[in-house]
Image: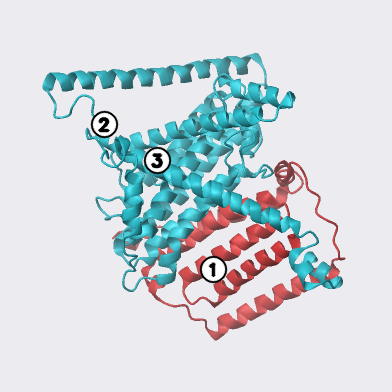
């Protein structure tokens, strides 16, 4: 049953993900992304990673997706224009895709199957918090600093320039 | 991936791959799904039915009208009449609208609210998913999906008012999600769990254990949470996404018939879910102020009785629903009393007032938990004082309401108002 549910959620995720790539319109792509994210959340639930599933929905659906659609609505020309992909972008996309594929294939080759079943911790959220602020404090802080830098950069780009005010 | 390869390793009949080794599990799953559909569709419809009638009745009384009073006793069947009217209306699609998104948006707004009921604890056993350890986060996450439905509805309508409504919804929501989450975090930090069931059990032994009285900071956080939940449910004074004086009806301007009614059902049920979360987080969940239900339930379980625990669960569900109803009444009361601010004022209030305030509360709560030991004299005194203050506040409000009511009746008699004294 878990296997069948896995296939169902994996299919949902794949349909959504392919839809994101194929969609010509950015809002349609955003909706397909929602489908893919819901499928991913289902997969996380199957793996007993409830916190990850819920957190993913909060961050990506409640935050990122809303921001994408909000950005489209703010910039009206994006809302009507269809996306076109140039040859340069295609090349970059193919290279990135091949790199990711190589990484995933390497990971599959180096994993010894069948993997041991995931241990179900009774209080996994607590352990997650403790390890984020304990063993993995430095990566966590680096990620925070990175996000702060991005935020300052965005604010800098969006600031009112002297000539705008005139 | 591991599952995929595992099944490829061992060739098995197709049916076994599809159904797994224990086909009976699918029967259980189908039964669960049907149970959820039956119970929750019923629940969602009844809540929508009564809440919409209640809203119109409250609005009427606040504006010195009767409200609906023609269909059924005291107008109770008004929602049914409205539903029949809506169902018989034409399902319109605006010209050059994005048809697919326009058609799925109402479902995208409604289905998540429906799903959020999975995690609400109506009683010690009356909760669908007992194993969900992050139920608080789950409710927050699933209500985030509802927002997408609302924004898409506004965007796909090809209507400038709808787009303005959707834009307001988006920026209001991502702003107010921060104080909402932070005020939840104040409580989570104090008690150390995201499980709505555990939060309920923790508060079930009497008024002074309710989390709103645990610290001065949780009491303030309850206020922040309530304001932020108004904003996240698009309730007045934060109803800018559909502000009817400027935007016709905002994001659902172009909707008619049953799709329109889905938005309404979603709104009122989101109100109920948010009230439920507030009840669980701050107001003792399904527990009565004296801890009678928890006591009776524990005794019935210990005694091995068969039906008494069920009765205690029903009582708990009654208390929980009553708390939600009171909170929903307050939301309606606020809506028909306060004027609507401008969108810049709404955002100003969030970013410059509520976010810093909730951050300060979080910090204060953390320090409090470090300084004041659990079970110490200071904690008990604080809880008692806060609980007494809370009770005094409720009593004072009730006295004010009743005296205003009596005053109104007297004025009415003195002036010979147009309404018969015992009106509906």
What residue would you read off at disc 2?
B424
- Please tell me whether residue B334 is drawn above or below residue B81 in the rendered image: above
**Residue farthest left in this picture:** B415
Give the Cα separation between the discs numbered 3 and 2: 16 Å
**Residue drawn at (54%, 40%), measured in percent from left and top?**
B182
Q: Earlier in the sequence, mark 3 or mark 2?
A: 3
B17 to the left or right of B333: right
Q: Is residue B61 visible?
A: yes
- Please tell me whether residue B367 is drawn above or below residue B175 in the rendered image: above
A31 to the left or right of B119: left
Q: Do the residues bearing badges 3 and 2 touch, measured as CB atoms within 8 Å?
A: no
Q: In terms of depth relative to the viewer, which is nearer, B46 or A140?
A: B46
Q: Quadrant of residue B184?
A: top right
Chain coloured cyan: B
- The image shows residue A157 at horizontal and vertical percentages of 45, 61
What residue would you read off at disc 3?
B50
- The image shows residue B350 at horizontal and vertical percentages of 42, 43
Q: Is residue A144 visible?
A: no
**Residue drawn at (66%, 79%), measured in percent from left and top?**
A95
Q: Colour of chain A?
A: red
- Please tell me whether residue B261 is drawn above or below residue B238 in the rendered image: below
- The image shows residue A57 at horizontal and vertical percentages of 58, 55
Q: Do the residues bearing badges 1 and 3 touch, measured as CB atoms within 8 Å?
A: no
Label 1 element class: helix
- The image shows residue A71 at horizontal and vertical percentages of 44, 63
Which image quadrant: the N terminus of chain B? Answer: bottom right
What residue would you read off at disc 1?
A32
Badge 3 crowding class, 10 Å Cα cut-off, few under 14, some 14 to 19, many 20 or more, is some
Q: What's the coloring here?
A: by chain
Chain on which label 3 sits: B
Give the Cα separation between the discs numbered 1 and 2: 50 Å
């Amino acid at each position: 049953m878990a296997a069948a549910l896995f296939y169902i959620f994996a299919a949902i995720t794949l349909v959504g993900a392919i839809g994101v790539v194929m969609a010509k319109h950015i809002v349609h792509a955003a909706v397909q992304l929602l489908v893919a994210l819901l499928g991913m959340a289902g997969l996380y639930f199957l793996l007993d990673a409830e916190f990850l599933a819920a957190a993913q929905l909060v961050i990506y659906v409640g935050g990122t997706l809303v921001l994408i659609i909000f950005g489209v609505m703010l910039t009206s020309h994006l809302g009507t224009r269809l996306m076109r992909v140039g040859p340069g972008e295609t090349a970059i996309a193919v290279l990135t895709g091949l790199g990711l594929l190589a990484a995933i294939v390497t990971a599959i080759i180096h994993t010894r199957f069948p993997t041991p079943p995931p241990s179900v911790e009774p209080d996994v959220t607590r352990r997650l918090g403790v390890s984020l602020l304990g063993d993995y404090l430095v990566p966590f802080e680096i990620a925070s600093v990175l996000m702060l830098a991005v935020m300052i950069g965005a604010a800098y780009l969006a600031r009112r320039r002297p000539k705008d005010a005139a | 991936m591991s599952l995929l390869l595992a099944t490829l390793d061992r060739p098995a009949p197709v049916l076994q791959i599809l159904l797994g080794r224990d086909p009976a599990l699918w029967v259980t799953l189908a039964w669960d799904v049907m149970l959820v559909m039956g119970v929750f569709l019923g629940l969602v419809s009844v809540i929508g039915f009564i809440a919409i009638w209640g809203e119109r009745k409250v609005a009427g009384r606040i504006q010195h009208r009767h409200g609906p009073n023609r269909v059924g006793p005291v107008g109770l069947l008004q929602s049914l009449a409205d539903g029949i009217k809506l169902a018989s209306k034409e399902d319109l699609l605006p010209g050059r609208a994005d048809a697919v998104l326009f058609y799925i948006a109402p479902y995208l707004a409604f289905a998540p609210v429906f799903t959020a009921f999975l995690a609400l604890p109506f009683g010690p056993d009356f909760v669908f998913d007992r194993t969900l350890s992050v139920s608080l986060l789950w409710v927050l996450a699933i209500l985030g999906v509802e927002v997408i439905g609302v924004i898409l509805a506004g965007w796909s309508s090809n209507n400038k008012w709808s787009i303005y409504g959707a834009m307001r919804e988006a920026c209001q929501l991502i702003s107010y999600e921060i104080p909402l989450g932070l005020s939840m975090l104040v409580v989570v930090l104090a008690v150390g769990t995201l499980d709505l069931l555990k939060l309920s059990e923790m508060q079930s032994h009497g008024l002074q254990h309710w989390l709103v009285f645990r610290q001065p900071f949780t009491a303030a956080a309850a206020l922040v949470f309530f304001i932020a939940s108004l904003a996240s449910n698009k309730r007045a004074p934060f109803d800018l996404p559909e502000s009817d004086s400027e935007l016709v009806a905002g994001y659902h301007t172009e909707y008619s018939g049953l799709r329109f009614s889905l938005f309404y059902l979603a709104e009122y049920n989101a109100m109920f879910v948010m009230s439920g979360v507030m009840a669980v987080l701050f107001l003792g969940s399904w527990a009565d102020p004296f801890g009678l239900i928890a006591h009776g339930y524990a005794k019935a379980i210990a005694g091995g009785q068969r039906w008494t625990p069920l009765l205690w669960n029903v009582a708990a569900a009654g208390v929980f629903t009553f708390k939600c109803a009171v909170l929903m009444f307050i939301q309606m009361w606020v809506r028909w009393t306060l004027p609507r601010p401008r969108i810049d004022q709404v955002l100003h209030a969030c970013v410059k007032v509520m976010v810093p305030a909730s951050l300060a509360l979080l910090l204060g709560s953390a320090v409090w938990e470090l300084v004041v030991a659990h079970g110490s004299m200071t904690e008990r005194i604080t809880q008692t004082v806060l609980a007494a203050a809370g009770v005094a506040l409720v009593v004072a409000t009730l006295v004010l309401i009743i005296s205003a009511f009596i005053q109104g009746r007297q004025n009415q008699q003195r002036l010979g108002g147009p309404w018969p004294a015992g009106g509906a």
